[in-house]
Image: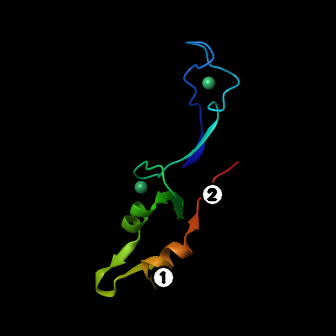
């Protein structure tokens, strides 16, 4: 998932949220499955890190390939196929 988070710890005056620092609205992106803060890929309606993608997609050991959307793909092909979750400005 992605979103914005207030990371300010009251740097203007202790106990008061400040209005000027750039930590008030910090973009974050984290894996829907494990919460990792890494590059994410869209799989169905989920946004997953690379490790969780490998677990979420059917792997066929005999073929050393992944079965995704009706096709056998190598790991490289799988990641090329998946849409990356973009950072927003
Ligand atoms: Zn602040
Ligand atoms: Zn993950």
Tell whether 55 sits left or right of 4: left
Answer with mark 1 or mark 2, whichever residue precedes in sequence. 1
Colour setup of the view: rainbow
Q: Compared to 28, does 5 lie above or below?
A: above
Give the residue drawn at x 63%, y 57%: 86
Q: Look at the image and tell me whether residue 66 can be seen.
A: yes
In depth, the one of 28 and 68 nearer the eye is: 28
Query: Residue extending furthest left?
Result: 62
Q: On residue 86, which mark appears?
A: 2
Give the residue drawn at x 43%, y 82%: 74
Horizontal and vertical percent position of residue 44: 53, 64
Q: Look at the image and tell me whether residue 68 can be seen.
A: no
Q: Compared to 43, does 72 lie above or below?
A: below
In depth, the one of 12 and 80 nearer the eye is: 12
Give the residue drawn at x 56%, y 12%: 14
Q: Compared to 42, does 36 lie above or below?
A: above
Q: Nearer the viewer, mark 1 or mark 2?
A: 2
Tell me if the residue at label 1 has its CB under 8 Å from ligand 2: no
Query: Residue extending furthest bottom?
Result: 63
Disc 2, SS: loop
Tell me if the residue at label 2 has its CB under 8 Å from ligand 2: no
Q: CA distance from mark 1 to mark 2?
A: 26 Å
Horizontal and vertical percent position of residue 20: 70, 25
Give the residue drawn at x 54%, y 75%: 80
Horizontal and vertical percent position of residue 21: 66, 27
Q: On residue 6, which mark appears?
A: none
Horizontal and vertical percent position of residue 87: 63, 53
Q: Which residue is mark 1?
A: 70
Tell whether 17 sits left or right of 49: right
Count of labels in the image: 2
Q: Quadrant of ligand 2?
A: bottom left
């Amino acid at each position: 998932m992605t979103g914005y988070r207030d990371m300010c710890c009251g740097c203007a005056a202790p106990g008061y949220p400040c209005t000027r620092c750039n930590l008030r609205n910090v973009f974050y992106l984290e894996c829907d499955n494990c919460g990792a803060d890494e590059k994410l890929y869209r799989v169905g309606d989920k946004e997953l890190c690379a490790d969780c993608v490998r677990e979420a997609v059917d792997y066929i050991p005999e073929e050393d390939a992944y079965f995704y959307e009706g096709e056998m793909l190598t790991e490289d092909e799988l990641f090329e196929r998946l849409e990356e979750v973009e950072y927003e400005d």
